[in-house]
Image (cartoon, grey):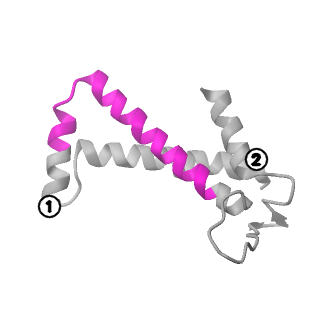
């Protein structure tokens, strides 16, 4: 797996999955007795028009994309989360051991480019 494949996998299996899961919970909260707040959000969401539900989905998708972008920016060192200003190194270990965020490759930029290409 290389850096681009990793970012594409995160988009599909983290970002898109989080959006889908959030909308699914809004549509039908899981469990025998979901918390009251979750039931209220579901009633609100289900009472929206299809156009408004699409807008909510769009906002959720943007929030998950922003979260993933921020996490990748931390891994790249573009956002600092510690006073030591250390460096995170992310490896994929399979048949080979591959550094996914070497100097010169910013994962958050790969994500942004992919988002720009898909609209």
Query: What secondary structure is marked by label 2?
Result: helix
How far from the left and from the top, in percent, is residue 64?
48, 47
Which quarter of the figure has residue 23?
top left
Main SS category, magenta section:
helix
Residue 55 circle label: none
Please rate how many residues cluster around mark 2, counting C-alpha atoms within 10 Å: few if below 14, some from 14 to 19, many from 20: some
Which quarter of the figure has residue 109?
top right
Residue depicted at x 76% and y 69% = 89
Answer above or below: position of 60 versus 86: above
Residue 32 circle label: 1
List the single residue furthest toward the front.
Answer: 83
Residue depicted at x 22% and y 37% = 45
Q: Nearer the viewer, mark 1 or mark 2?
A: 2
Residue depicted at x 59% and y 26% = 119
How far from the left and from the top, in percent, is residue 102?
84, 60
Q: CA distance from mark 1 to mark 2?
A: 41 Å
Which quarter of the figure has residue 76?
bottom right
Answer above or below: position of 59 versus 38: above
Please rate how many residues cluster around mark 1, counting C-alpha atoms within 10 Å: few if below 14, some from 14 to 19, many from 20: few
Q: Which residue is mark 2?
A: 4
Answer above or below: position of 114 versus 68: above
Does the residue at mark 1 contact the one at mark 2 (Cβ under 8 Å)? Answer: no
Q: Which residues are magenta?
A: 42-71
Answer above or below: position of 109 versus 97: above
Whether residue 41 is in magenta: the answer is no
Query: What secondary structure is marked by label 1?
Result: loop
Whether residue 52 is in magenta: the answer is yes
How far from the left and from the top, in percent, is residue 2?
80, 53
Q: Is residue 55 left or right of residue 115?
A: left
Q: Earlier in the sequence, mark 1 or mark 2?
A: 2
Q: Nearer the viewer, residue 42 or 84?
A: 84
């Amino acid at each position: 797996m290389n850096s681009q494949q990793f970012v594409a996998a995160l988009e599909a299996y983290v970002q898109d999955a989080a959006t889908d899961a959030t909308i699914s919970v809004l549509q039908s909260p899981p469990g025998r007795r979901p918390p009251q707040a979750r039931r209220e959000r579901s009633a609100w969401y289900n009472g929206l028009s299809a156009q408004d539900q699409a807008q909510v989905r769009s906002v959720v998708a943007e929030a998950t994309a922003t979260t993933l972008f921020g996490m990748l920016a931390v891994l790249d060192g573009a956002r600092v989360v510690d006073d030591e200003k250390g460096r995170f190194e992310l490896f994929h270990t399979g048949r080979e051991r591959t550094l996914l965020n070497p100097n010169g490759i910013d994962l958050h930029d790969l994500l942004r480019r992919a988002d720009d290409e898909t609209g």
